Image: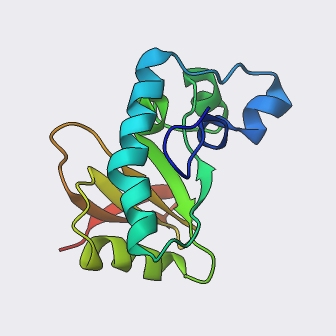
Amino acid sequence: MKLSNNFTLEELTISETAARQGIDNTPDADVVSNLTMLCGNILEPLRASLGGKPISITSGYRSPKTNEAIGGVATSQHCFGQAADIHVSGMTTEELFLFITEKTSLPFDQVIQEFNQWVHVSYRANPRGQKLRATHEDGKTVYTAVA
């Protein structure tokens, strides 16, 4: 099922963890609606801003059980279909983070450069426009706001 011109429900719901552990990662209608808004407001405009470069989704929707299995927090926007972790070939994680936060005017809720591994983008009504970096310190995840 297409959520937008370039993004499908399958790519935003696929989970190796869910598959390995036999967890149903099927979203309900509200989650599908949120994923559609994420694609329409963030992912498609970002792809256009990147000159049509493909965006790879490494994590999209996570059912509560899938989220628990990977150690995610219960309030994760992934559980509501409001977030995706992404990569763009040919760009470092930091380059992608800076591109989104400095060269676009996307109505994001959060953009998080996580551990120099991926960029988390999210969308919701009344977006906060948060720009964060996530690092590991003493075994804990620390989020630092970026001006």
Tell me if I can see residue 59 in this picture.
yes
To which quarter of the image does residue 18 belong?
top right
Tell me if I can see residue 134 in this picture.
no
Q: Is residue 114 above or below residue 66?
A: below
Is residue 96 or residue 69 the one in the foreground?
96
Number of callouts in the render?
0
Q: Is residue 82 above or below residue 23?
A: below
To which quarter of the image does residue 48 belong?
bottom left
Residue 3 location in percent, x, y?
Answer: 51, 38
> Which residue is at a point 54% across and 60% down the rendered structure image?
86
Q: What colour-coding does the image apply? A: rainbow
> Which residue is at a point 34% across and 60% down the rendered structure image?
111
Give the residue at the far top of this rendering. Answer: 28
Image position of 62 (left or right of 112):
right
Q: Is residue 64 above or below residue 7?
A: above
Residue 2 location in percent, x, y?
Answer: 57, 37
Quadrant in which the N terminus is drawn: top right
Quadrant in which the C terminus is drawn: bottom left
Image position of 40 (left or right of 21):
left
To which quarter of the image does residue 30 belong?
top left
Q: Is residue 13 above or below residue 88?
A: above
> Which residue is at a point 23% across and 58% down the rendered structure image?
130
> Which residue is at a point 20% across and 36% down the rendered structure image?
125
Give the residue at the far right of this rendering. Answer: 20
Residue 136 location in percent, x, y?
Answer: 50, 64
Give the residue at the far front of this rendering. Answer: 5
Residue 95 location in percent, x, y?
Answer: 45, 82
